[in-house]
Amino acid sequence: MRVLSVVGARPQFVKLAPIHHALIAAGHEHIIVHTGQHYDRDMSDVFFEDLEIPHPDENLAVGSSSHGKQTGAMLEMLEVSFLRHKPDWVLVYGDTNSTLAAAVAAVKIHQPLAHLEAGLRSFNRQMPEEHNRVLTDHASDLLLAPTSVAFDHLQHEGLGHRTIVVGDVMTDVCLATRDKCKTQAPEMPHGWSTEDDYVIATIHRQENTDDPIRLRQIIDYLATSKSKVRLLAHPRLKSKAAEANINLLKGNIQIFEPLAYPQLVHAVCHSVGVVTDSGGLQKEAFLLDKPCITVRTETEWVETVNSGWNTLDPNCSQSIDEILGREYPAHSLQPYGDGHAADAAVRALSSWKSTHG
Ligand code: UD1
């Protein structure tokens, strides 16, 4: 079986790693196409190196621009790429503009399309990611869902017959990296000390960064923490803060560049907790037994909230020190699978192909 993966943004490189290793271990051919949506070394290359993913077979170097321009440029180039490689499956990941572009390119030329991390919903139509995931799910031939909640969403939308629950591949890589970090701690950036009590923070979503009033509210909130707040600054955050003349170095906030994946896992494991608007980081905090505050009105990863470990605080009104300082009950369930989702995803691709192909 020949699978062509399309990736482009940071969280997709994390999901790609276990899928690549599972495909190769099962004797399949894997072609990797990088759209170039993320292009900074610390947003892209370091993930390929640390997670032992080979260089992409193609890099479309699309770069940053408006949603339409960025998605349109990818769409045009991906069509050419799919026609050249003629894979058995185009595999797309998550909810970025790269995901949507690849889904539209594939379905238009009748190229079998599978969506990994299908069925997540925020039900917030202001989020670009929500349009991307809904449209991609409806275009796909096979939906690889991470959880039973995701399956229920797909069934409700009439897509249950195309869905297989495989578990969450980010759990595979998160747990494996945690175990590796225990025996070999990664080298941390200059100025990072492990002894301090610190909170890990990331803010990058368009709805939080692009409105200066909202962004100022979030930075003021982070500055209320008594513990140090290590803010891992995404390029979008830095550029929008600079445009709005917002000083990120307020209160106990310290600024660091985005971390490599093993560094991030290590940093969360030694933190008091996380404040974020990232989907992936909410779940990583949960998997690493750290409490999280999510500065959004909703989450796609509802299991983290239902378990009590993730607190939604869109109004930035609850005390960071109090929420992250609480005692939390041990997790009794594994809603995201046992760390072998990538093998299940590869088996699903292979068996679907032989019964429907
Ligand atoms: C994208 C995804 C989001 C995902 C996030 C992870 C979409 C709609 N959004 O958001 O779902 O959670 O990636 O990071 O696809 N930039 C750089 N260097 C880079 C990449 C981006 O400087 O390597 C800057 C660009 O100037 C751009 C801004 O960051 O203006 C935002 O990048 P973009 O790809 O538009 O979306 P993200 O905010 O990263």
Image (cartoon, helix red, strand yellow):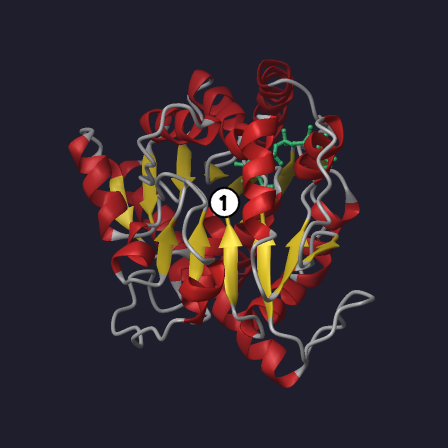
Crowd band around label 1 with a 10 angstrom C-alpha radius: few (<14), some (14–19), many (20+): many
Q: Secondary structure at mark 1?
A: loop
Give residue 293's quadrant in the image.
bottom left
Percent position (x, y) of residue 66? 63, 17
Q: Quadrant of ligand 1?
A: top right
Percent position (x, y) of residue 303? 29, 56
- The quadrant of the rendering that contains the C terminus is top left
Disc 1 marks which residue?
Answer: 277
Please name whichever residue, 133 or 187, is drawn nearer the observer in this view of the structure. 187
Percent position (x, y) of residue 270? 58, 75
Residue at 81% across, 67% down: 191
Please name whichever residue, 283 or 6, is drawn nearer the observer in this view of the structure. 283
Please say whether residue 177 is visible from this viewpoint.
Answer: yes
Q: Is residue 133 left or right of residue 72?
A: left
Residue at the right extreme of this rendering: 190
Q: Quick check: 246 above or below 261?
A: above
Residue at the bottom extreme of this rendering: 183
Give residue 210's quadrant in the image.
top right
Percent position (x, y) of residue 79? 58, 20
Residue at 58% across, 35% down: 215
Q: Quick check: 312 above or below 243?
A: below
Please say whether residue 27 is visible from this viewpoint.
Answer: no
Counting labels gives: 1
Q: Quick check: 220 above or below 274?
A: above
Please name whichever residue, 54 or 110, is drawn nearer the observer in this view of the structure. 54
Q: Is mark 1 within 8 Å of ligand 1?
A: no
Going by the numbered disc 1, the residue's amino acid type is Asp
